[in-house]
Image (cartoon, rainbow, N blue to C red):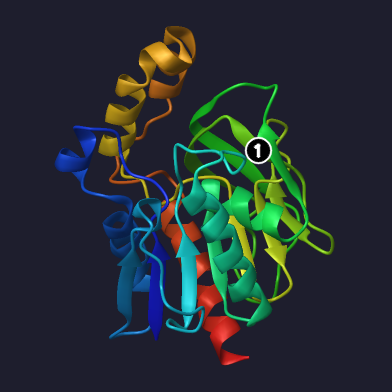
Amino acid sequence: MRLGILEAGRPPAPLDETHGRYPAMFADLLRPHLPAGIDIVSYAVIDGEFPESSVDCDAWLITGSAFGVYDPDPWIATLKDFARGVADAGMPMVGICFGHQLISEVMGGRAIKSDKGWGVGSHRYALKKRPEWLTDEGVAEFDTYVSHQDQVTEPPPGAEVLAGSDFCPNAMLAIGDRILTLQSHPEMPSAYVEDLYTVRRERIGAERIDAAMQTIVDTPRATDADRVAAWIGAFLTHALNR
């Protein structure tokens, strides 16, 4: 199995030097939940580095980004075209935060800057539907870190809302049996989240950041980050075996 990570964003300097970049965070998170010997490669699409073909990898993951899906940067339009090609080819695809929003737009939904403002801290989502690959019986909610202003306000036609909250109703979507998207960030370590919120304190506002800091747990990642990683691994394994 070969997983291609499409790097659509980077930690703000100097956090990239301290904590590394997002593809490495995803590799560390997901590798224990994917088949042994998996090959994980990354493409810096934010720099215009794209795969030659949508079938260069067996599955794809689009990372988060500080950009919005509505921004005019040429690489975003190219990424939308690439994601459309992946979907048309029936290749499994996962989107996280910006990736969640971009895939939703590509597939006919809508993502905009929310009038609810910034979402930061550990957010709890309620599971609403359970695809056959999500076998965690008895689990009704999960907690993961977030950092976003934009939200998917209109899911694509035919999408199933798997999880949401009052703040973010469309937080986890399944589009057919080949696409899974999430608004939250299971890949972000707790130490990185703390530093990220500190860097963004002035931009987001001290009151909201102070409240978010209280939700950062004393574990390597958010409370249910590993659980969500297992779901992503189960989704990819299920999609590739169909």
Report the amino acid beneath label 1: Gln
Which residue corresponds to the image point at 61% horizontal and 74% vertical from the top-left?
Answer: 85
Quadrant including the C terminus: bottom right
| Picture quadrant where residue 83 is located | bottom right
Height in image: 167 above or below 157? Answer: above
Give the camera-side residue of 7 and 240. 7
Most distant residue in the left direction: 17
Which residue corresponds to the image point at 40% horizontal and 43% vertical from the top-left?
Answer: 222
Confirm whether residue 155 shows in the render. yes
Quadrant including the N terminus: bottom left
Give the camera-side residue of 153 and 214. 153
Give the camera-side residue of 143 and 161. 161
Most distant residue in the bottom direction: 241
Confirm whether residue 134 shows in the render. no
Quick check: 214 left or right of 112?
left
| Picture quadrant where residue 92 is located | bottom right
Q: At which x and y percent is residue 11?
A: 30, 39
Height in image: 79 above or below 53? Answer: above
Q: At which x and y percent is residue 118?
A: 56, 24
Which residue, given by chain and number where applicable, does mark 1 sit on?
151
**Element class at badge 1:** strand
Quick check: 40 left or right of 129?
left
Task: Count residues near mark 1 (Cα–Cα under 10 Å), then give few for <14, some for 14-19, many for 20+.
Answer: many
Q: At which x and y percent is residue 215?
A: 43, 28
Q: At which x and y percent is residue 15?
A: 22, 35
